[in-house]
Amino acid sequence: MSNSAVASPRLVSPASTTSSVAVPATTKALSFRVAALFAGIGGIELGLHRAGHDTLLWCEADPAALAVLQAHFDIRDTISEDVAQLTELPMSADVVTAGFPCQDLSQAGRTAGIEGLRSGLVGHVFRLLEQRCDDPPRWLVLENVPFMLSLDGGSAMHLLTSGLEDLGYSWAYRIVNTNAFGLPQRRRRVLLLASTTEDPRGPLLAQDAGAPPPKDPDGRACGFYWTEGIRGLGLAVEGVPTLKGGSSIGIPSPPAIWIPGEGLFTPDIRDAERLQGFAADWTAPAHADGRRVGARWKLIGNAVSVPVAEWLGERLQRPRPYSDALDVELSPVDRWPKAAWGGPKGHYRAVVSDWPIHRPAPKLLEYLEHPLKPLSARAATGFLKRARSGRLHFPNGFLADVAEHARQMTAAA
């Protein structure tokens, strides 16, 4: 795409322009121009927009995601549908974002690794950066699942960091939890920030609130994965576990919610959107042309939480100094930690949590606005069978409530 074809878009959805964090009027914040690769439904870009930044280029290949972007953003003449066909980045872009596909890196996916058919598309990010090596963008933002830190002995992170260092970038990454931003969803994702001119540690690592103590599940609404039950449960107290694009066999699988004494339910897609920081019905345009609602669950499950991107956008504007006094150098045989930073001269473990800030989240049932749907008899019965055959420990009363729910739903059917 030629630079002359790039124009800054505007949001066309009034609901999406509301910022949850006010910028002090006395401080003039930097405004960066963004090139969005693997834009999805615009989670990163919406968050950066709320922080005061503009998107110059959108690149997204999924037709359902494109329908959502086109409904909420004015992206005329700024869209490229195939990153493999994108020949250059806009020279005026200060920030390049890439929430590249995680299917080959996640535990729920195929775990083919960084060179898998989908996740391997990140190679085009490096191709485009290399073409701008004489005038690189100020920042690069990558996002993906924490499992890539351990998959194949951490080879995915080694490929990413060594590729960045070959291009002269310093980098920092940390796992960040959506729950830290006041949303009742436990969602942990890796944010990687890199630059050839700036210190990425200041924006990404300098702020840390520390994870709060775990909550007691007794008497509280808890989200869990009804598709599991043998090796894991994903229990989240007063929240839901990570919203996923689908199960390992490609079936959309919204989490279940256990309400002690009342039964098992699943949230409405509109509340799933809100749990990611979007307005309700943000993905409705993907359903308008006859696609099933499962397409919306996939889009939401693959999205970046909006408040996380907004926080990062604000930190890019006002980075804090970072102290590395407690950091320890990593050896080539060390596992990738939850947070680290480095460059050509070495790699270091960062002593920070996955809670950079702590905005209290409301109770789950108080947050949800739309009717819950009872978990089906088949789903409840299947989960109960798996749970009873495994060795997991469950909260008091949980399996009894699952059994009673399965009985009632079977009788009703």
Image (tube, rainbow, N blue to C red):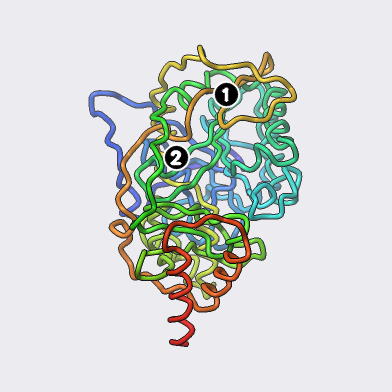
The residue closer to the viewer here, 61 or 363, is 363
* Amino acid type for the residue under numbered disc 1: Ser
Categorize mark 1 by other alpha carbons within 10 Å: few (<14), some (14-19), many (20+): many
Residue shown at 38% from the left, 29% from the top: 209
The residue closer to the viewer here, 386 or 209, is 386
Quadrant position of residue 319: top left
Per the image, label 2 sits on a secondary structure element best described as: helix
Residue at numbered disc 2: 309
How far separated are the C-alphas under marks 1 and 2?
A: 17 Å
> Are the residues flagged by discs 1 and 2 in contact, CB closer than 8 Å?
no
Categorize mark 2 by other alpha carbons within 10 Å: few (<14), some (14-19), many (20+): many
Vertical placement of 401 versus 185: above or below? below
Task: Give the percent coordinates (x, y) of residue 103.
Answer: 66, 52
Residue shown at 45% from the left, 62% from the top: 283
Residue at numbered disc 1: 195
Vertical placement of 143 versus 74: above or below? above
